[in-house]
Image (tube, coloured by chain):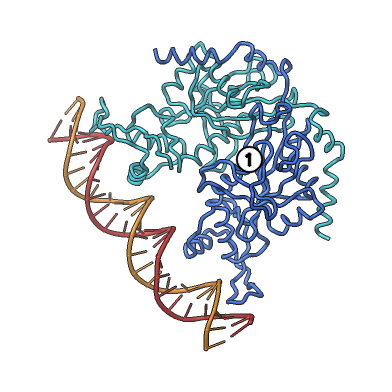
Chain colours: A blue, B cyan, C orange, D red
Amino acid sequence: MKRRKSESRDASVVSEKAFLDAYDPGAFERPSVSVDVALLSVVDGALFTLLLQRPDHPFKGKWSLPGGFVAIDEPLEAAARRVLAAKGRLTNLFLEQLYTFGDPHRDPRMRVITVSFFALVDRGRFEAAAPSRSALTVARIAVPWEGETGGPVEVHVGEARSVAELAFDHAEILGMAVKRIRGKLDYTPIGFQLLGDTFTLLDLQRVHETVLGRPLNKDSFRRRMLASGQLEATGEMEREVDHRPAELYRFVKRSAV
Amino acid sequence: MKRRKSESRDASVVSEKAFLDAYDPGAFERPSVSVDVALLSVVDGALFTLLLQRPDHPFKGKWSLPGGFVAIDEPLEAAARRVLAAKGRLTNLFLEQLYTFGDPHRDPRMRVITVSFFALVDRGRFEAAAPSRSALTVARIAVPWEGETGGPVEVHVGEARSVAELAFDHAEILGMAVKRIRGKLDYTPIGFQLLGDTFTLLDLQRVHETVLGRPLNKDSFRRRMLASGQLEATGEMEREVDHRPAELYRFVKRSAV
DNA sequence: TGAATAGTGTCTATAAGACAATATCCC
DNA sequence: GGGATATTGTCTTATAGACACTATTCA
């Protein structure tokens, strides 16, 4: 009885027309497909991203992630790299596919399915990608949830105290990026993309703390990092600090596991 | 110098035509978008999935995941549920988006970008979804890598010893599904989707071992599970076993964290 | 010398793995 | 009773957190 009921309910959802339309690839309207990239960087203990102010409708004047439509014979990741190179002169980034957003009304003009990516950028390249003449603008990310709860984030453009309005579902995309990177941080050497070639253990800890949004124990952080085999001491020391200088480390390519 | 060089190299990749074509949503050809679902179940210590034999070109006669094209006003997950309801009478499944595959030549006919999902099904519903008259066929999954290395898997249809050939990039999609579920198993109560309402701790351990592809320590598995707060003792006992019966447990909804 | 952080050593609490002992069911 | 697995308890080991102490640099 129970089974029967759920079957008949579902059957009504699947109209024959929808099924047939969807079955023949030539017989139905095709959506547009775009890519959007959530760029993330850590600067002075805060998370930042790069946004563009939309010049036209829809969402005119609102802020959006760099993105663009996928060409008919272009791989998805290539489209994301093209967008980054064109809009921010950013190349050779660590780029990972995040999630595909396909709500039928996420773009009021027409059906646009967007494949989102995230990229981690060190401070130097991040700031260089958004010079004053550029369309890309630095925005600080405020995460209104803890751990890997997920959900949209808030952004503050420049020094603004107020929350900037984001176009489309881009606040959700950024939130998904933060959630994903928090999850990866525990077991993958992600931090190296956010730091320069060499860094102290405290630098690394601060990056982790900023991404995770919570303080970490200094002792066990040091022990874990050194035990992970992902760090290599350079023998060099920090300079121009008014305290005992720390040793500089670099990330070492993980040997084939 | 170094910087200059990488810029000019990238600039050549971004042809102006590609950029302009991609910029205007109306000015370029749109891809087809489909969904494919990797159904996973655990039966007698092995991982299984459900496949369809393709009746037409391309990949005629090869095995494929259940899938279909996304209608123009249909959400992605709804498309996946429609396909499952239509092809296997499977409803109300735990369904999660996996990855989007967009290689320009993954379908020889035309550009098809596919958004893949995975679903976990308990043994009872799994076997009921593939009766003899049905198009869906049970196939065993052999994972040729350990841990979360990733990569395509091999499938064996029925009792066949030989590896069945999969259409498109579906071996990769299945591999991605296995990788994802392995990663989630450690910190999420995924197992309950693969078991019936009640189960013993050993049942649960065997499911975990099958998914992870490695044996687990019995003592610490028991302790971890009981300490997780995700299990609730029913007070009932296993029946019809020729040894001391174990207590039956059920999964309890995780309280809002 | 003092301020500030780096780096080391030790102790404790917690979780995992190993293993032994006892309990309970069916035959 | 014998076979088989469940369940509990204890011991050992590895890891994380806490904290005290020494080291080194610059002002």
Relative vertical location of residue B110 with respect to residue D17 in this rendering, above or below: above
Compared to B191, does D16 lie above or below? below
Residue A118 appears in the figure: yes
Name the quadrant of the N terminus of chain B: bottom right
Q: Position of residue A224 (x, y in %)?
A: 50, 60
Which residue occupies the foreground of this view, A159 or B67? Answer: A159
The structure residue drawn at horizontal position 40% and vertical position 15%, both measured from the top left corner, is A2
Q: Chain of mark 1?
A: A
Residue A134 picture location, percent across and down: 80, 51
Is residue B146 toward the left or the right of residue B106 in the image? left
Residue B166 can be seen, yes or no:
no
Is the residue marked by circle 1 packed among few (<14), some (14-19), or many (20+) residues within 10 Å? many
Instruction: Report the number of discs.
Output: 1
Which kind of residue does numbered mark 1 sit on?
A: Ile
Secondary structure at badge 1 equals: helix
Q: Position of residue A201 (x, y in %)?
A: 57, 65
Relative horizontal placement of residue A71, taking residue B194 as reference (left or right): right
Q: Quadrant of the C terminus of chain B?
A: top left
Q: Which residue is mark 1?
A: A173
Q: Position of residue A106 (x, y in %)?
A: 66, 31
Residue A172 relative to residue B108: left or right: left
**B69 up-or-down from B187: above or below:** above
Residue sitting at the far front: A162
Which residue is at the front of the view, B209 or B19? B19
For the residue pair A40 and A185, the one nearer the viewer reads as A40
